Structures are given as C-alpha cells and as structure tokens.
Amino acid sequence: MAETVKWMWRGVQSLVSNQCRCHGVSGSCAIKTCWEIVPNFAKIGDHLKAKYKDAVQVVYNRKKRRIRRKEQKRVKITKDTLVFIDRSPNYCNPNPPLGILGTSGRVCNKTSAGGDRCDLLCCGGGYNTQVVREVKRCQCKFVWCCYVTCKACPRIYDRHTCK
C-alpha cells in the first residue's frame, strides 16, 4: 500500500509545473518570483488512469531478488511503470471468502452518466425494474407548543436493481 501511494505521488509530481513572474520598473526583471502549480484533479486522474491501464503484471525471482514481466515482452520496466503481482478479483461475482458480495441486487441508476449507472454497475448482466410506492412525511410544520404535524405524501418511482 505504501509503495502504491509513493508511486501515485511521483505521478502527481511529474505533472507539477513552474510559473514565474517578473517584477521591476518598466517591465525589467529586477525580481523574479516563481512557484509550482499543481494541475487540476481531472488531469491528475486522467494521468493515473492511463498508468493504471498500462500496468504490467510481474513475478518475483527470489534467487536474483528481482522482478520481471510475467509475459515475455521486451519492454523495460522503469521506475514510473505501475506493476502488480496478483490480478484484482472479479467484483461482479460473489466471493464470500474475500468479502466480495457481487453486484446482484444492488440498486443502480438507469439514467446516470456516473459510476452508479446500470450498464456499468451490473457488469453487463442486465437489471430488473420494480415500481415502488412509498409514503413519506412532507410539508411538516411546527405547532406552538410543542409538536410537529406532517402530511403523508405518496411517491411512486422505478427502482432498478442488478440481476
């Protein structure tokens, strides 16, 4: 975990740039002030995501005390290469020993563009739609002294859950 954080920090540092401004009479550069600028989070996220997609699976050779690519390709592993030993488990399917519940039964959002959208969250397995009717308290008012009155407001909506 600590190595991953160090690697991510190196990735962010590689995106930092310097910006300078000159101060002086008539545009002369008698005094120059410089500072570092960290890019916005979207640029950092895109950079780290690209590194994640290009990550290399490695095996450790105990005798030589070195790592090497699992696949025999002639591409050098540099200090900026993200490496991993074990593949991540499939989070779509349940795996109780690992504490992975899978996505079956999870509520998803059919119209979302984010990570909770049904086609992404349900791992391509589809989803069920159920019409839900619930009654919630609404239009609550404080009555002097000392209670609150509310109306019961019915709400009908579609709930989507992964198959």
Image (cartoon, rainbow, N blue to C red):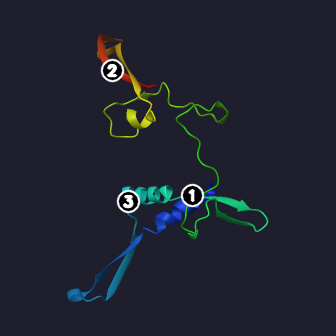
- The three-letter amino acid code for the residue at tag 1 is Val
Decide: few, some or many residues near mark 3? Use Cα within 10 Å; few <14, some 14-19, many ≥20.
few
Disc 2 marks which residue?
A: 158
What residue did someone put label 1 on? 5
Judging from the image, what secondary structure is the residue with disc 2 in?
Answer: strand
Q: Decide if residue 46 is on the left or right side of residue 63.
A: left
Q: Looking at the image, is mark 2 or mark 3 earlier in the sequence?
A: 3
Q: Amino acid at mark 2?
A: Asp
Query: Mark 2 against mark 1, which lies toward the viewer?
Result: 2
- Amino acid bearing label 3: Lys
Q: Nearer the viewer, residue 96 or 72?
A: 72
Point 46% across, 58% down: residue: 48
Secondary structure under the numbered disc 3 in the rendered image: helix
From what the image shows, is residue 67 above or below residue 150?
below
The answer to whether the residue labelled 1 contacts the one labelled 3, judged by CB atoms less than 8 Å apart, is: no
- In the rendered structure, which disc, 2 or 1, sits on the residue that comes first in sequence? 1
- According to the picture, the residue beneath numbered tag 3 turns out to be 43
Residue 150: % across, % down = 31, 12
Residue 99, given in percent of the width and then of the height, sits at 62, 34
Q: Is residue 80 left or right of residue 144?
A: right
Which quadrant holds residue 124? top left
What element does badge 1 sit on? Answer: helix
